Amino acid sequence: MRFMKAHLIFMAMRKLSFYNFTSLNGCINGPGGDISWNKQHSLKEDTEYAEEGAGSGNTLLFGRITYQMMAGFWPTPAAMEMMPGVAVGMNQAEKIVFSNTLEQADWHNTRVISGDIVEAVRALKNTPGSALTILGSGSIVTQFAAAGLIDEYLIMINPVVVGGGTPIFNGLEGIIDLELVNSRVFKSGAVLLTYKAGKVF
């Protein structure tokens, strides 16, 4: 009986991945939040990768700022014209936004979680459902990373250097041990690195 309970708990665990793009010097944005230097979608190959991710069926997690940026673009006709495959996937996906100030989320299939978000994600990982993916959202990633909740890190490094930007793990204390499990070079010059999370100390 004890084995069966442990097996059911293991089966219920949901994988939490983090994806973001950075500059070569590890910034997620430039001064004033500028991300115009991101070359991820400059070529067909990059767009196809984005479509694959958007259609994965994962539950998407956001901080408020990233959520509002995404919600202001993907439901629009411009998004459907520019990247229809990504737009459909993003709009249909189950989405969660973490915020203590946002009272409601108007983007289709989105719910708001407030309060202790670390404990909320810890509980979420222990419920049945699809895998979880954090997109961008540097403000919450540091908290989840420090708590050891992130299982996999996918970092898309752009071939640009950004001065005066925000580091990808801004404010993180301590060390997170990572293991490189995959790498991919895109024709745009971007490099995708996939890391399995190890110990946090």
Image (cartoon, grey):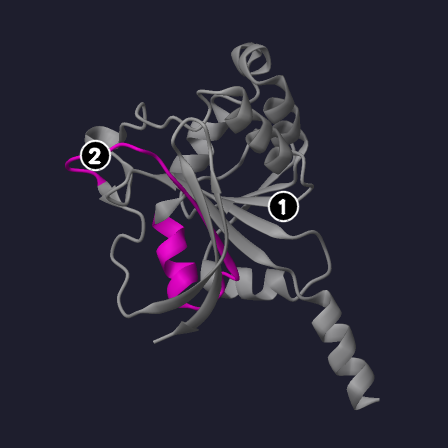
Numbered disc 2: secondary structure:
loop
The mark found on residue 59 in the picture is: 1
Q: Between 161 and 111, which is closer to the camera in this rendering?
A: 161
- Residue at the spot 47% in from the left edge and 65% down from the top edge: 197
The image shows residue 77, relative to residue 10, as above or below, that is above
Numbered disc 1: secondary structure:
strand
Task: Indicate the quadrant where residue 15 lies.
Answer: bottom right
* Residue 63 visible to the viewer: no
Name the residue tied to disc 2: 162
User: Is 101 on the left-hand or right-hand side of 120?
Assistant: left
* C-alpha distance separating marks 2 and 1: 30 Å
* Residue 79 visible to the viewer: yes
The mark found on residue 181 in the picture is: none
Q: In this view, which residue lies farthest toward the bottom? A: 2
User: Is 159 on the left-hand or right-hand side of 5?
Assistant: left
- Residue at the spot 51% in from the left edge and 28% down from the top edge: 46
- Residue at the spot 47% in from the left edge and 45% down from the top edge: 19
